[in-house]
Image (tube, rainbow, N blue to C red):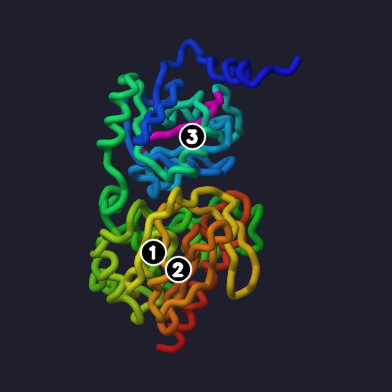
Amino acid sequence: MPRKAGEWKTKTMIRNPVDMKPAKLALEDGTVFAGCSFGAEGETSGEVVFNTAMTGYQEILTDPSYRGQILTMTYPEMGNYGVNDEDFENKHPHLTGFIVRQHSRIHSNFRSTGSLAEFLAQHNIVGICEIDTRALVRRIRTEGAMRGVISTVDLDDQSLIEKARASQGLVGRDLVREVLPDQPVHWDQQLSQWWDLVSENSEKKPDGDMPHLVALDFGMKWNIGRHLCNQGCRVTILPGTATASEIMEHQPDGVFLSNGPGDPEPLDYAIQTIRELLGKVPIFGICLGHQLLALACGAKAFKLKFGHRGANQPVHNLETGKVEITSQNHGFAIEESNLPDELEITHRNLNDNTIAGLRHKTHPAFGVQYHPEASAGPHDSQYLFERFMSMISCAGANN
């Protein structure tokens, strides 16, 4: 017999395995969700956001761009294929909390080396499951991203709401300094062997005659380094705080600007460095790197209501007329009303018409507000790495 709506809700919400402790999520607007703890126990705060990807939770968890945020996955079940030692995008997770509808207590995959819950516990990430993530995401979409608290130790609603309201937001905060690499790195890791199954391009081995790239790491995903290396480049990764003179000491043929967390406006040091590099070497920026490139040219950034985070975001390529299906993760974007004359829009997000790509009209520099290195299914945007290589070749031929 069909259930009444109230019966369905009651039956789904009471599912509470005996070995899972209670946990609560509170938002700054006074909303409280009761669920179960998985992963680490304790209390954590951050900006609550959501990602619409159906898979790839390990890559998402280890993306430094989530620093300072509590992430909600919209797909209802997570953890069914476990985690492995190959799919890290950084050395450890940087988000502050993880929210799922249902955590799979069984994981099965030939590459799996552990469970999602074990992974979260190992890295001290507090997680909560068994809550209505549809209701949570709908609230975020309506009201905007909000500060929140997850706790397994304090289950008093009013106390948690007050903690959420007192927690730090993202605007005006320099989160990049919290995820910077300790020292320069000479990157030589190629793309995974699995890439050969979907790529028509043969692997290019970097050597002393190949272009030398300096990648400024503001919280870089490792697959970016793999793609740059796979283009046949020698890649040196420098902390995002490096000055223009320190970068030019490496005699780069091109400079890459990585993704990273938070608000681009406070990063004066990076904006000044990029401003000094413009016109000296070809520049390619992804996500935060794209924003910093625009700000170095005089543009302004603004905070999106709830951001773009997912693996199937449509982007219109204004140069070709094609639509690219992209992976995205950002909460800020570039204002079109204040766009400097020297910048030209090359891509647009079709969901809200915001700027998704820019290029400089006179200098060899461009950026996109999405992740062409991500391989969540579509590979529509990976031509951008080849475009960067062509730009470097042209610059070398003109010198």
The answer to which image quadrant residue 361 occupies is: bottom left
Asked whether 101 falls inside the magenta stretch, the response is yes
Mark with earlier residue (2, 3): 3
What amino acid is found at the position of numbered circle 3 in the picture? Leu
Q: In whole angstroms, how far apart are the C-alphas of marks 3 and 1?
A: 29 Å
Asked whether 95 falls inside the magenta stretch, the response is no
Report if the CB atoms under discs 1 and 2 are less than 8 Å apart. yes
Q: Residue at x 57, y 67 (%)?
A: 383
What amino acid is found at the position of numbered circle 2 in the picture? Gly
Q: Residue at x 39, y 24 (%)?
A: 24
Residue range corresponding to the magenta coloring: 96-104
Q: Position of residue 87 (x, y in %)?
A: 50, 43
Q: Residue at x 37, y 31 (%)?
A: 30
User: Is 148 situated above or below 171?
Assistant: above
Mark with earlier residue (1, 2): 1
Left or right: residue 217 versus residue 361 is left
Q: Which residue is at the far bottom?
A: 398
Q: Position of residue 90 (x, y in %)?
A: 40, 46
Where does label 2 land, which residue? 367
Q: Which residue is at the far top?
A: 18
Q: Residue at x 48, y 80 (%)?
A: 393
User: Is 179 situated above or below 31?
Assistant: below
